[in-house]
Amino acid sequence: MTDSIRELTILQPDDWHIHLRDGKALSTTVSHAADSFNRVICMPNLVPPVKNIDDARAYRDRIMEHLQNSELSIERKSAFDPRMTLYLTDKTTPKDIKLAAQSGIVQAVKLYPAGATTNSSDGVTDINACVDVFEALEKYNLPLLIHGEVTQDHVDIFDREKRFLDEVLAQIIVKFPTLKIVVEHITTSDAADFVLTQGNHIAATITPQHLMFNRNHLLLGGIKQHFYCLPILKRESHQKVLLDVATSGNPKFFLGTDSAPHATDKKENACGCAGCYSAATALPLYATAFDSVGKIDKLEGFASRFGAQFYGMPVNESTVTLINTPMQVPSAYPYFDGY
Ligand code: NCD
Ligand code: ZN
């Protein structure tokens, strides 16, 4: 925050894209998430994935158990509301979607093209086979959250997002014109432009790392694997456009950390996992990014209003105060490998 602004109070934010993982990992991830956010959309890429309403209920119960066992205040415990997602596979049925829509705990369905990212091997192999499921999503007004990258081996990793928009997403939108879609963790000016040209039912989340960093941070002077996530950081010109749209006050762009923890030995590895863990520091990171372009006044909309509006939920009533003071980001947290 600029020198003149030492403190900033905003409505309590929500995180519309987070990986909490499972098992003992929840004792760290749930506390971090619930410390900052009220509603969080929990990604379903566990092993095995969250495929149906029974899986979603059981996963939510495990999250709530860790919440109750945490040292968070009673206020934070009662404010935290994990919203669940189903992992779309080749076998998902319209009935799965109907039950999810009626459940009151499932907020959306997640599409991972098979092989696109961490734990996506059970993802969709043929989008054209999902017609019935997309129809059901439209019918029950359940949003489709998309990891937007093509997966063919020969496609350059830096082009995969744009190719998905042009070759896959554009067609889905034409075929299902009222389907609510969030293009998750956008990384390119192409994705920002794509979302801007669509109707209000098409939105995007943006992570803190894609606002703060570009591929030079990942690759220059040695590979920094802690900056490695998917979709991969792009060149600086893309980072600048993401900062422009995130701080523009346009409600199509809202907060989704994509906080994705991995055990140190899997991250710091010759074949290191994709994912950046930001749950504990996300708000200061976003505030730093917004402040870097003199737009701290736009943080509340992005972090606390636009996502709720998109999902048709009320904005939170409580507030959080950010204080502009130097902080050291811990190099690691206690974490028990869990998916
Ligand atoms: C995520 C993970 O680790 O689960 N990794 C990542 O690089 N973002 C999966 C995802 O959201 O792509
Ligand atoms: Zn993710």
Image (cartoon, rainbow, N blue to C red):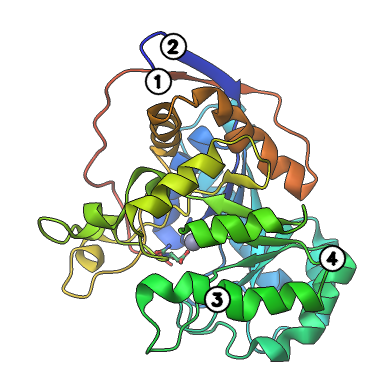
How far from the left and from the top, in percent, is residue 224?
A: 19, 57
Residue at x 74%, y 62% (from the top left corner): 143
Q: CA distance from mark 1 to mark 3?
A: 36 Å
Which residue in the structure is indicated by mark 3?
Answer: 164
Of 338 and 88, which appears nearest the observer? 88
Q: CA distance from mark 2 to mark 4?
A: 42 Å
Residue 292 falls left or right of residue 21: left
Q: Of discs 1 and 3, which sits in the foreground?
A: 3
- Amino acid under label 2? Ile
> Which numbered marker is on residue 1?
1
For label 3, the crowd category at 10 Å Cα-Cα, with few meaning under 14, some 14 to 19 and many 20 or more, is some
- Amino acid under label 3? Phe
Of 52 and 293, which appears nearest the observer? 293
Q: Secondary structure at mark 2?
A: loop
Which residue in the structure is indicated by mark 2?
Answer: 5
Residue at x 39%, y 36% (from the top left corner): 285
Residue at x 20%, y 65% (from the top left corner): 265
How far from the left and from the top, in percent, is residue 106?
A: 73, 60
Q: Of discs 2 and 3, which sits in the foreground?
A: 3
**Which badge, 4 or 1, is on the more N-terminal residue?**
1
> Which numbered marker is on residue 178?
4
Residue 43 falls left or right of residue 98: left
